[in-house]
Amino acid sequence: MSVQAQEISPLDDPKFQRVEPFQVFDNLYYVGAKWVSAWVLETDQGLILFDSLYGELTDIAIDGIRDLGMDPNDIRYLIVSHAHFDHIGGARRIQDEFGAVVLMTDEDWQMTDEPAIYREYPKPIRHLTATHGGTLNLGREKLTFMKTPGHTTGVLSTSFTVYDNGYPHAAVMFGGAGLNFDGVERTQMYLDSIAFLQSLEGVEVNIPNHQDSGEVFERLEKLALREKDAPHPFVDPEGWTQWLDELLAAAEEKMADEQAKR
């Protein structure tokens, strides 16, 4: 059975959630679980980890880094897409064990003060705060941060360059695509964020923080069968555009529902 055909629950079972890590681009690797993603960007000055997973699932990311021939002690930065448990639950462990610097937006750092969120997972120590338009440089890699609120009030999206046999492609990670929130104001935030992402030019690669949002495992199967000089299955600008259109339509429907509640 292919991975995408399997169910993704139970969500907290590390044996069930474990998938083999894999390389997607010259400098980008998937070290996530079945239902929630974690990615590693490799530079000549260390590693950047996107999201930490949570609980015992954090072992999946750590083991994946090792299995791919890298050292988790080389994690220089942990970029948290938003402060929901599945993305930040393992952040304190990554800090304590490997000395990584954690980075997210001010709004989502403030979420870590809410005890209901962190009663099961240790609260990370506040390090760096990402701002809209801010950048991070490590080695030759330059990351640009974008605040795209809605899913939380401080969702952090990131743009960076990935390489396919040395050829560069523009990639974006949208930090919070889910519509599991309430209210007209939050929905308008989300709509504005989608409009902003749609305004970005030249995006070729969708790097999702939940694998099903970007058909990661389906694309992996195509990547494994890719012939020399064939297009890279993760390079899909039309797919990025179509996905944003779908998110926009769903958010517009949600807005109508939220307004009807008033």
Image (cartoon, rainbow, N blue to C red):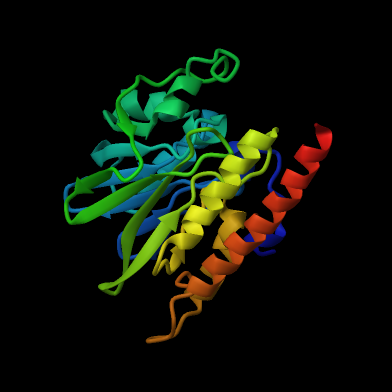
**Residue sitting at the far right:** 260
Quick check: 175 left or right of 160?
Answer: right
Rendering quarter of residue 247: bottom right
Rendering quarter of residue 179: top right
Q: Quadrant of the N terminus?
A: bottom right
Residue 12 showing in the rendered view:
no
| Front residue of 36 and 240 | 240
| Residue in view at x 36 percent, y 49 percent | 40
Q: Quadrant of the C terminus?
A: top right
> Residue 92 placed where, x, y %?
40, 24
Quick check: 168 left or right of 214?
Answer: left
| Residue in view at x 45 percent, y 49 percent | 31
> Residue 126 placed where, x, y %?
34, 21
| Residue in view at x 31 percent, y 61 percent | 161
Residue 148 showing in the rendered view:
yes
> Residue 75 placed where, x, y %?
28, 39
Considering only vertical position in the picture, is 11 above or below 66? above
Q: How many marks?
A: 0
Considering only vertical position in the picture, is 252 above or below 221? above
> Residue 231 placed where, x, y %?
44, 82
Quick check: 176 left or right of 50?
Answer: right
Considering only vertical position in the picture, is 48 above or below 170? above
| Front residue of 31 and 176 | 176
